[in-house]
Image (tube, helix red, strand yellow):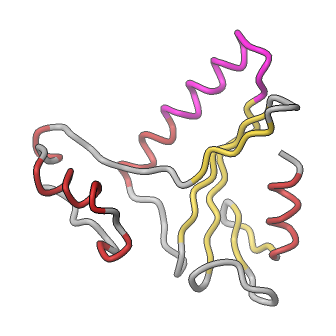
Amino acid sequence: MTRDAQFTDKMTKFSLWIRANCRDSKTGLSLTNLDFVVTDYKKKTIVLLEEKTHMGDIHYGQQQIVGVLVKALENYEKVSDWKFKGFYLVQFLGDGPEEGKPLFINGEEKTVDDLRKLIDEI
């Protein structure tokens, strides 16, 4: 069964078009997006970062493709001078980072300063 899209009011016209006009997951096509590929081109470091608001979680299909991307980047690291520093799931209680409110990074409660430090140290 095709999984219904969540938060269609936040989707681009292209995202909506794909869902309306292309084959669906019953045929094997799976659509997911990854919020951020964060790089430091001077240090040659890379991180994958997924943002979820309102304590949303990664759905099964997204978990699967993130696993593929992580393995690919770990393998790429072996044949290049780039360093893959991991995948991070950042979950917010509300719509985003708000001073004074906790957030979660890979399931651990953190602060906005912890998030800033994580990104700055990439």
Q: Position of residue 21 (x, y in %)?
A: 10, 50
Q: Is residue 21 left or right of residue 74?
A: left
- Above or below, 34 against 86 in this view is below
Q: Which SS does the magenta portion mostly show? A: helix
- Above or below, 27 against 33 in this view is above
- Above or below, 15 against 44 in this view is below
Q: Residue at x 70, y 9 (%)?
A: 79
User: Which residue lies most toward the front here?
Assistant: 13
Q: Residue at x 58, y 34 (%)?
A: 70
The C terminus lies in quadrant: top right
Residue nearest the viewer, comparing 53 with 1:
53
Q: Residue at x 66, y 65 (%)?
A: 107
Q: Residue at x 37, y 50 (%)?
A: 32
Decide whether residue 71 is among the magenta residues: yes
Q: Position of residue 62 (x, y in %)?
A: 41, 49
Residue nearest the viewer, comparing 82 with 56:
82
Q: Position of residue 1 (x, y in %)?
A: 13, 55
Residue stretch in magenta? 68-83
